[in-house]
Image (cartoon, rainbow, N blue to C red):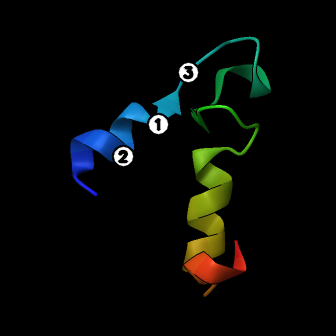
């Protein structure tokens, strides 16, 4: 998947998770996903 396609999935909305960037259609913050990846979680474990 291209970088532009990935970035289109990230949204900012002050009404969702206090405006933190989230994955569109979820309440999963980008910070949360990056933290999981940093600690060794694989894509399949998501």
Residues at badges 3 and 2 in contact (C-beta under 8 Å)?
A: no
Answer with left or right where residue 17 lies relative to residue 3: right
Residue at the image point whose x is 24% and y is 49% from the top: 3
Please provide percent x and percent y for residue 40: 60, 87
Residue at the image point whose x is 68% and y is 56% from the top: 32
Residues at badges 1 and 2 in contact (C-beta under 8 Å)?
A: yes
Disc number lying in front (1 or 3): 1
For marks 1 and 2, give the CA distance: 5 Å
For marks 1 and 3, give the CA distance: 10 Å
Q: Is residue 6 above or below residue 40?
A: above
| Residue carrying label 3 | 12
Please provide percent x and percent y for residue 10: 48, 35
Q: Residue furthest bottom?
A: 40
Please provide percent x and percent y for residue 9: 46, 36
The numbered mark, 3 or 2, whose residue comes first in the sequence reads 2
Please provide percent x and percent y for residue 45: 70, 80
Residue at the image point whose x is 28% and y is 58% from the top: 1
For marks 3 and 2, give the CA distance: 14 Å
| Residue carrying label 1 | 9
Residues at badges 1 and 3 in contact (C-beta under 8 Å)?
A: no
Q: Is residue 4 above or below residue 31?
A: above
Q: Nearer the viewer, residue 31 or 11?
A: 11
Circle 1 crowding by C-alpha within 10 Å: few under 14, some 14–19, many from 20: few
Residue at the image point whose x is 62% and y is 60% from the top: 33
Helix, strand or loop under label 2 = helix
Helix, strand or loop under label 3 = loop
Disc number lying in front (3 or 2): 2
Helix, strand or loop under label 1 = loop
Q: Nearer the viewer, residue 31 or 5?
A: 5
Q: Quadrant for residue 14, please give it.
A: top right
Circle 3 crowding by C-alpha within 10 Å: few under 14, some 14–19, many from 20: some
| Residue carrying label 2 | 6
């Amino acid at each position: 998947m291209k970088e532009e396609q990935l970035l289109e999935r990230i949204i900012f909305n002050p009404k969702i998770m206090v405006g933190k960037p989230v994955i569109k259609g979820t309440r999963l913050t980008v910070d949360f996903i990056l933290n999981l990846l940093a600690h060794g979680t694989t894509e399949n474990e998501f």
